Amino acid sequence: MRNIKIFCLTVLATLAFTACNKEPEVSYDVPPAVQDAGTVTLEFRNFLGNQPLQLGTEYTSNGQVIKFSEVKYIISNISLERENGTDVVYNWDKLDKGTLLIDQGEEASKTILLDTMAASKYKAIKFGLGIKKDLDTISVTKTISPKFTELTRQKDMQWTWSDHYLFAKFKGTYGTNNPLSILIGNGSKGKKFHDNWDEREDISDNRDAFRYITLNFASPITLTKDGHIKIIIKADLDKLLNGDNKQTLTARIPEDQNNLDKIFPIVNNIGGRQGNTSGKIVTVSKIKNKAGDPDVDLEGLSNTENRSGMFSILSVE
């Protein structure tokens, strides 16, 4: 029987992460209304290292052969940061207009036009990987963002057992054709411990798969009134296994939750390890298991703050 490797960033009823700090709070304040405006095209291109990513092609990552059949992830909460540190946001909280569901198999999914951005000088671009918690409830957002909700259903980017979105999905094979499925998102019910399903229980507040990316421009860029800028972002999937936290794919990652320690390193590899406003780094030290079972210590987790994850600016035109 072929070995199956499944990673799911879902908190299971009997497990909780302990951390020296909670995940950082992200400010979602909307700046003053845009008056003089230009447009910005934002395009994402997937790579593995320096090679443009192609589905069905074998690559080597952290010394391991890997081949993707499906690569999808959600980009939300896009903003540009002015030189003075204030942000100009684009349709935050409007998932139908301001969110991308990038699908490697669909070229058109990788580009979004930011059609009303203030004319200004900018030093950075910011965006979310996933959906922030206050919008990550399908039964709520389907009424205010029906197009996005339907798209995620069609693209199979919703948990089948939970009222939440999948933030990222990486499927394919590794090694000698071993199936690979890495699913990332938040969950709040239907948690599994070993072979038994426990009653529903909300996830702990200090666990969140959403990551907020900040990419600085090499030098400030100027968007003029009625002007246009194109920003191309590189997403390097080599970081999945070969980021700050090196990941070795082994013969079997069972569905029992003794292997949830694999998840946070992967999330931090692609979305960044982020500190809070006081500059302290979030440190997940162990997984708290069900009463009577030993806790799982996390080893080899990078302590380096990283707000870019697998993303970098490829070019600005």
Image: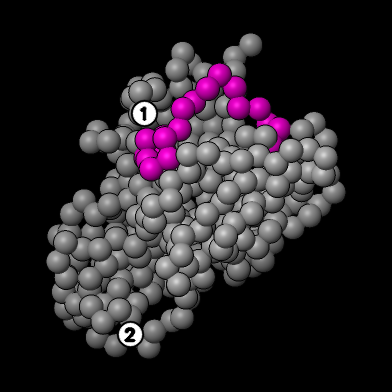
Image spot of residue 30 (x, y percent): 43, 81
Residue to which mark 1 is pinned: 62
**Main structural element of the magenta stretch: helix, strand or loop?**
loop
- Taking the magenta stretch, the answer to whether it contains residue 5 is no
Image spot of residue 65 (x, y percent): 38, 21
The residue positioned 45% from the left and 17% from the top of the image is 175
Give the colour scheme of this rendering: one colour
Q: Which mark is residue 280?
A: none
Looking at the picture, does residue 52 appear above or below residue 283?
above
Question: Magenta residues?
Answer: 239-257
Q: Is disc 1 surrounded by few (<14), some (14 to 19) or many (20+) residues within 10 Å?
A: some
Closer to the observer: label 1 or label 2? 1
- Amino acid at circle 2: Val
| Left or right: 158, with 98 as reference point | right
Q: Which mark is residue 34?
A: 2
Disc 1, SS: loop
